[in-house]
């Protein structure tokens, strides 16, 4: 009872605090979204799918999905059916919150309740379901591999208390109900347990300690809940409508960021996903540990973990509750104070103005360092008869994404403004990019109304479809490496594959698309050295070459130059491959 | 019977050691993978600081080592360790039993196409230091027009002192090589503008500093302190080179019609296999590990295996020759002491 009141008031206060921490317009947006029928329906659907049925986990691993949904949905149904019982049989008690939980203790079996055998059956059924889930959870502690998880999180002390009390609740409930089944009634599980118990323990006085133990376990669980990973249960219910309202992280510790941190169930799926995980020493730099450190306000570790990350976004992509590990880290980085803050407002864009063609090609810094790509791209544009202008042939301004990744929003904004000026003055209607790092910030942060922003893989696919480039299909086997910024970052998965299939045979990497492994060269990390990155690159290469392709194809100049260093076979950009194979 | 000594590599270190060992009364056997002796030096034109022809040096060394057994176009197939000696099978079918091995395997030149931003293999007017030496020797290279380049640049430290290129070591000889080649180009084409893009100029050797000052004063070579950031090609096919002049603190951009990349020295990748067969350790710089980097640079941690020259790190020609001689002497002492 105390536990219940405590947890409800705690959640309420937390809820109000998080909502109050949202900036004014976001809060307004949130409340409007709550009453908009479309998002309301989506909220309810998402809460059911994610919190109760754990659809995402089912997709990952059936056992893992069953374990979670049996506990969550089973428990939920126990509460629902319990309430129905109370409403039906003892309506005058329905106002008492604790009554349904201990219903069997208070109610003696009468003629009336016997007719409710259906509900009793349901109760026992769901109890069995929860118990099976708990059993799986115990098994998972020993053998996480069966659940598709190579490594799991190391639980903290309070987490362990929460864990053991959660494990204890339902077996104790079974025991307690077993003792009272002959008085209060029961069904296949509790009744039969009752017979077994009575064969050697016939004293009803035994039931009191059992009920006490059950209620203690429940109480402990509810009291420690806010301080353990189980806080994700209430936090996720808040996170879903916040996310559906389209709210973004605006403060490193408050508002949505806080909701995400608390919604982290510490499941540790991100540990296996993290490309740094190839080295054991980096396990504690994964998102789950970041969330734990943020909850503990351990600033030193927060900084270390945030700076080390490659920002590949894979933990975000696979997170079952939708914690945005990459954005959370960028937000932490933005707290940093620098002694020198570069000022780019003095850059004279007049010298950089490009006039003329409708299609404007922006190669970006990374392509400038891999001239083979821009050369191939120009050759392709000429072959297709596209008249284009080359925005940064003679030097240009960085797109701003590296500064954004470093959390230096003001510097990034200045570059965005300068580039916007140049692009708008050029009169172009299409902006073509060969670097996914640029592509992402152009899509997300630039306001270029009326100008189409397109990545070169999409553009090449279009040119081939329109017949402006004709391909000579060869027998070379290609594997496509999904660059983080293009795939997870911008959701472009199909066009590169389509383009490659025009050039030759396409094979797939073991982990691809959303689960593609970062090449290790990412600009995202501020502190990782080359020696550390090397093992990540080698791991990513091993994943790519499983189907023994002849050529590793990618669509990012940075991935390309990273792979070239360690690959045992050619690594090429899609533009180079198409340029070679088109007639 | 004369003691067999197997020398792996017929470059200047191998030749010099063979000549010395022969004079000491042993039977040196040189195994060379190429079809000629002299290694990298044989492909060079003139040697700093006195501009002496490399050809003469190689000819002299070859003549001195003439009495040794020399197998060209031959590699080591496999090695069997016997009780106190090695049975070495060569790819030409001959097997050698010896107690003593001398690694004179030298170095490989860093593959400049790995530094993609400099455009080697992508742009038509980019070459390496070796390509330029080859042109000095043969006069044949499409990249260099007959009337000479109007403006050309040398990029120092390509694939050396570069963590990204997996080689953080200084290659030692490229600074002076670049200065030498810059002077040679100026001698051939006095009207050409010649730039050197450098990080530091490491003029440590005899008369190197004089050479450098002469390049500035007498030849007007322009030295720009700063790394080249990127190279692009303009419409005429000339190269636009961007760099930072760190002395004036300004970014600079020059248009060149020839760019020479000073490829650094990396360990000869082929010898890694032979070294692994003999379980010889590699040092953290990627070269063979000596017993002691101060006192015993020519000795391996293994009994009877010796090193000479650039297999233990970048070295100049005189340093290599001196090491070859001291390795010969060390082998001699080893044999005498083991006979007792």
Image (cartoon, coloured by chain):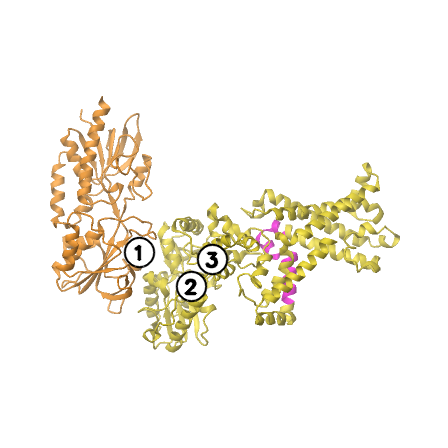
**Colour chosen for chain A:** yellow
Cα separation, mark 3 vs mark 2, equals 16 Å
Residue A57 part of the magenta-drawn span: yes
Q: Identify the chain drawn in orange.
A: B
> Vertically, is A546 above or below A471?
above
Chain of the residue where label 1 is placed in the rendered structure: B
Answer with left or right where residue A89 lies relative to residue B8: right
Chain of the residue where label 2 is placed in the rendered structure: A
Instruction: Determine which residue is flagged by label 3.
Output: A312
Q: Which mark is residue A403?
A: 2
Cα separation, mark 1 vs mark 3, equals 25 Å
Element carrying mark 1: loop
Task: Give the mark count.
Answer: 3
> Vertically, is A183 above or below A357?
above
Q: Nearer the viewer, residue B93 or A294?
A: A294
Cα separation, mark 1 vs mark 2, equals 25 Å
Answer with left or right where residue A83 lies relative to residue B2: right
Element carrying mark 2: helix
Q: Quadrant of the N terminus of chain A?
A: bottom right
Q: Which residues are magenta?
A: A41-65
Residue B16 part of the magenta-drawn span: no
Q: Position of residue B333 (x, y in %)?
A: 20, 28
Element carrying mark 3: loop
Q: Residues within 10 Å of mark 1 (few under 14, many from 20)?
A: many
Q: Quadrant of the C terminus of chain A?
A: bottom left
Instruction: Determine which residue is flagged by label 1.
Output: B115
Q: Are marks 1 and 3 on the same chain?
A: no
In the image, which is nearer the foreground, mark 1 or mark 2?
Answer: 2
């Amino acid at each position: 009872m105390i536990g219940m009141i405590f947890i409800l008031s705690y959640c309420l206060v937390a809820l109000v605090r998080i909502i109050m921490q949202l900036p004014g317009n976001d809060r307004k947006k949130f409340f409007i979204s709550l009453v908009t029928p479309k998002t309301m329906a989506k909220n309810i659907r998402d809460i059911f799918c994610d919190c109760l049925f754990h659809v995402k986990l089912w997709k990952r691993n059936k056992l893992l999905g069953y374990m979670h949904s049996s506990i969550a949905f089973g428990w939920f149904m126990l509460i629902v059916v319990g309430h129905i019982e109370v409403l039906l049989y003892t309506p005058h008690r329905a106002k008492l919150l604790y009554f349904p939980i201990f219903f069997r203790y208070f109610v003696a079996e009468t003629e009336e309740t016997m007719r409710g055998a259906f509900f009793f059956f349901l109760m026992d059924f769901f109890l069995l379901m929860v118990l099976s889930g708990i059993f799986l959870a115990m098994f998972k502690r020993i053998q996480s591999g069966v659940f598709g998880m190579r490594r799991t999180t190391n639980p903290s002390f309070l987490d362990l208390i929460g864990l053991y009390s959660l494990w204890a609740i339902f077996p104790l409930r079974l025991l307690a109900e077993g003792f009272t089944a002959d008085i209060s009634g029961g069904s296949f599980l509790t009744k039969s347990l009752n017979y077994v118990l009575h064969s050697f323990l016939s004293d009803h006085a035994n039931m009191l300690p059992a009920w006490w133990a059950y209620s203690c376990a429940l109480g402990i669980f509810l009291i420690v809940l806010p301080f353990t990973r189980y806080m994700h249960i209430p936090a996720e219910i808040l996170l879903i409508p916040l996310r559906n309202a389209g709210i973004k992280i605006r403060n490193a510790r408050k508002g949505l960021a806080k909701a995400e941190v608390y919604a982290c169930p510490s499941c540790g799926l991100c540990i296996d996903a993290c490309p740094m995980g190839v080295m054991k020493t980096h396990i504690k730099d994964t998102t789950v540990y970041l969330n734990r450190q943020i909850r503990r306000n351990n600033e030193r570790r927060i900084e270390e973990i945030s700076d080390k990350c490659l920002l590949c976004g894979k933990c975000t992509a696979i997170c079952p509750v939708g914690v945005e590990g990459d954005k959370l880290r960028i937000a932490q980085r933005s707290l940093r104070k620098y002694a020198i803050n570069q000022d780019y407002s003095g850059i004279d864009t007049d010298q950089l103005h490009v006039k003329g063609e409708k299609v404007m090609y922006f190669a970006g810094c990374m392509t400038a360092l891999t001239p083979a790509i821009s050369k191939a791209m120009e050759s392709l544009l000429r072959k297709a008869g596209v008249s284009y202008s080359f925005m940064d042939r003679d030097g240009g301004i960085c797109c701003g994404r590296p500064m954004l990744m470093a959390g230096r929003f003001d510097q990034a904004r200045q570059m965005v403004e300068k580039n916007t000026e140049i692009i708008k003055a050029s009169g172009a209607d299409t902006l073509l990019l060969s670097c996914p790092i640029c592509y992402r910030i152009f899509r997300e942060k630039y306001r270029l109304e009326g100008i189409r922003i397109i990545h070169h893989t999409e553009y090449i696919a279009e040119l081939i479809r329109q017949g402006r480039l004709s391909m000579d299909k060869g027998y070379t086997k290609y594997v496509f490496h999904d660059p983080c910024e293009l795939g997870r970052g911008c959701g472009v998965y199909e066009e590169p594959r389509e383009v490659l299939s025009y050039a030759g045979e396409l094979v797939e990497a073991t982990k691809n698309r959303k689960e593609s492994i970062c090449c290790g060269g990412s600009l995202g990390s501020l502190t990782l050295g080359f020696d550390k990155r090397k093992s990540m690159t080698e791991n990513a290469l091993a994943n790519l070459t499983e189907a023994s392709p002849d050529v590793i194809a990618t669509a990012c100049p940075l991935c390309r130059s990273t792979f070239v260093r360690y690959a045992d076979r050619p690594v090429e950009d899609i533009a180079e491959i198409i340029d070679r194979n088109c007639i | 019977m004369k003691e067999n000594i197997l020398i792996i590599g017929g470059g200047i270190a191998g030749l010099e050691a063979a000549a010395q060992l022969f004079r000491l009364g042993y039977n040196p056997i040189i195994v060379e993978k190429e079809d000629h002796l002299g290694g990298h030096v044989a492909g060079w034109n003139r040697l700093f600081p006195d501009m002496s022809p490399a050809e003469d040096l190689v000819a002299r060394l070859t003549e001195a080592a003439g009495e040794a057994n020399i197998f060209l176009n031959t590699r080591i197939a496999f090695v069997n360790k016997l009780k106190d000696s090695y049975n070495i099978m060569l790819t030409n079918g001959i097997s050698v039993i010896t107690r003593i091995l001398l690694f004179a395997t030298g170095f490989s030149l860093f593959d400049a196409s790995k530094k993609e931003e400099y455009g080697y293999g992508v742009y038509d007017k980019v070459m390496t230091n070796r390509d330029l030496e080859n042109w000095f020797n043969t006069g044949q290279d499409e990249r260099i027009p007959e009337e000479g380049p109007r403006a050309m640049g040398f990029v120092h430290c390509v694939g050396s002192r570069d963590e990204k290129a997996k080689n953080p070591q200084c290659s030692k000889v490229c600074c002076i090589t670049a200065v030498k080649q810059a002077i040679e180009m100026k001698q051939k084409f006095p009207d050409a503008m010649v730039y050197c893009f450098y990080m530091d100029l490491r003029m440590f050797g005899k008369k190197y500093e004089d050479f450098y000052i002469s390049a500035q004063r007498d030849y007007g070579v322009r030295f720009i302190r700063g790394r080249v950031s990127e190279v692009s090609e303009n419409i005429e096919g000339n190269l636009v080179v961007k760099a930072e002049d760190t002395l004036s603190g300004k970014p600079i951009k020059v248009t060149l019609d020839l760019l020479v990349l000073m490829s650094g020295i990396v360990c000869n990748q082929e010898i890694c296999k032979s070294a692994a067969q003999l379980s010889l350790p590699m040092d953290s710089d990627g070269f063979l590990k000596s017993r002691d980097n101060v006192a015993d640079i020519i000795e391996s941690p293994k009994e009877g295996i010796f090193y000479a020259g650039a297999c233990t790190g970048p070295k100049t020609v005189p340093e290599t020759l001196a090491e070859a001689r001291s390795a010969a002497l060390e082998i001699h002492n080893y044999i005498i002491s083991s006979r007792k």
